[in-house]
Image (spheres, helix red, strand yellow):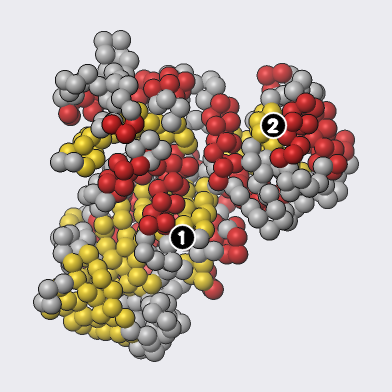
Amino acid sequence: MPSISNAETLLAIDVGSINTRASLFDVVDGKFRLLASGRVPSTDRYPLLDFGEGVRVAIERVQAITGRKLLDESENLIMPTTGFGTGIDLCVGTTSAGPLVRALLVGLMPGVSVASLQRLASSMMMEIAGVIHLSDRRQDHERIQWIVDSDADIIMVAGGTDGGASGPLLELIDLIGMAVERLPQEKRPIMIFCGNRHLGSTIVDRMVERTQVILASNVRPGIEKEDLTATRIRIAEAIASTRYQLINGYEELKQWAGGHLLPSTEAFARVIRYLSAVVDSDAGVLGVDLGAHQVTMAEGTPADFNLHVRPDLGLGEPLAKLEEFIEIDQVLRWLPFEFDPEDLRNYLQNKALYPASIPVNSTELFLELALAREIIHHAMMKACKDWPDGIGVLKHGVLSAKELILTGGAALSRTPNPGLTLLTILDGLQPTGISTLVMDPYSLTASLGMMAEVLPVGTVQILGSSSLPRLATIVAPVPPSSSQRSTLHIRLDSVDGGHILETAISGGDLEVFPFKPGMEGNLVLRPDRSLDLGFGGAGKAGIVQVQGSILGIVIDLRGRPLKMPKDLPTCRALNQAWLEKAGVNMGNGTALATE
């Protein structure tokens, strides 16, 4: 195998809950580029229960597109390359398929170690089976029975700063030990200890005859210090061993990838973390990935990073329980046509039963995008509440300004009209300030995050290519309301001084001004005294450099937070008007076309 520094051809495999993708990257004109991507239904579920079937078919799709032979006669990956257009140099993998892992959280203090465990759990694909801590008022025998009844796959234990508390923590460890001894060997959960690292060997000794113990970094090495990143990766490895033990093909994929295999959410987070470090702004980056079985929200600034995963929200199976979080009328208000609430409930149940189904007409498409708006808004608000110190949110539940917003997931990135994607993001996230909206139409972000581990230069070059196109530059002031008395004056000049556009937009309006990819210019913004664009206060003017994009420059003066009317007929009229502004032609009310 060639050294990583000399590698030129990389195959990235992503096994998702619905689709499996194989993406081939190679050097073209001195830079890494995406050559081809093959997407097929995943095969990890019944009746096949085998990752490998879907992986091989996806690779065969890539072979058919490129003419490059990647599998030998035994359907094994050809690695390294032969020098004759055959094989690859490197392989990496990401996964989000498989059943949810149930986790029991055990810590010392609710506001310290337990809080860190809860934030850690919320950044991973897992279901919380319960929480135990010293002050939960249960007797020891009740705690032991709770552990036995929890049906947990893993027990995450934290507590004590490094070199700190030991006695109370060891008491909890002994309780766990007595509980797991009551379970059959095959039902005993893995214990992951991420507390006082000085107790690691002691805990292993106490539990070695009872269950498997995995040691991870302390999530709370100091009272005022929290460190989740290294622990999250260690726990991801443990989750993989639990989640995929009954599914064939995982170990083979891990072998092909040379161990470079991570959950898709963690790989997605890597890209957001990298982008937040390189953007020339303290505003940072927001990443949103909406899948069939989860929503991932990742926010990074040069000084901080936060990750939030919601396995109970998505556009597939979680829709069966959507009304536990979101009211039906909240979804209906985003439709440009009348729709019966009971018909929507039926749609939710059918979609939950058949999560791989895609919209077959414009009605279903608008339903899915209305659901996407509410799901990502709910996930964003919950994430920002859970993140330390409310990072990411201004007062009154308004998202703070982001330099860049990256969106992933088929519902957000592969609509038949880019205007639909734009409105879904604007209505769901309600960004403020001046942001660049970037799409991931080929679902590459997770693969690029994994690729960064072996070929970081490749990730950097592909992030700067057309594989992740710019959708629009969004300008959204923060006004006290969407009052029509507010006004924003704009002027757009090309970099060579040519005048392109000059106009004024009134409060309540949404306008889209074309500015094609490849173009560069200077955007002069002069808000009135009620509008704040982040230039130092309300009414402050400024100039920003802008690059062309698919839709151009979007001015959103509809107000933050966006307040929809209470009556649905008025909502329908507004949605129709906004669709027209975004370049989506409703035609007879249900037809969909690009103008």
Q: In this image, 245 relative to 300: left or right?
A: right
Give coordinates of residue 540: x percent, y percent: 37, 85
Say which residue appears at 40% left-offset and 48% top-offset: 271
Query: Where residue 11 is drawn, which disc sits there?
Result: none
Looking at numbered disc 2 in the image, what kind of residue is underneath it?
Met
Position of the N terminus, as image quadrant, is top left
Looking at this view, is 382 or 285 the one in front? 285
Dot 1 falls on a residue whose secondary structure is loop
Q: Is residue 579 visible?
A: no
Most foreground residue, 232 or 143: 232
Residue 191, label in figure: 2
Q: Nearer the viewer, residue 442 or 327?
A: 442
Q: Is residue 111 above or below residue 269?
A: below
- What percent of the width, then of the height, locates residue 49? 46, 20
Q: Residues within 10 Å of mark 1 (few under 14, many from 20)?
A: some
Please identify, in this view, whether the residue under mark 1 or under mark 2 is nearer the observer: 1
Q: Amino acid at mark 1?
A: Pro
Q: CA distance from mark 1 to mark 2?
A: 34 Å
Q: How many marks?
A: 2
Relative to residue 206, is residue 57 drawn left or right?
Answer: left
Q: Quadrant of residue 567?
A: bottom left
Q: Secondary structure at mark 2?
A: strand
Q: Residue at x 30, y 84 (%)?
A: 526
* Residue drawn at (28%, 31%) of the image: 6
> Of marks 1 and 2, which one's residue comes earlier in the chain?
2
Task: Relative to 522, say whether 363 is above or below.
Answer: above
Please, is residue 581 above or below residue 340 in the view? below
Q: Is residue 263 left or right of residue 403?
A: right
Packing grade of label 2 (10 A; few <14, some 14-19, many >=20) is many
Q: Which disc number belongs to residue 302?
A: 1
User: Which quarter of the figure has residue 81?
Assistant: top left
Which part of the image, by quadrant, shows the C terminus?
bottom left
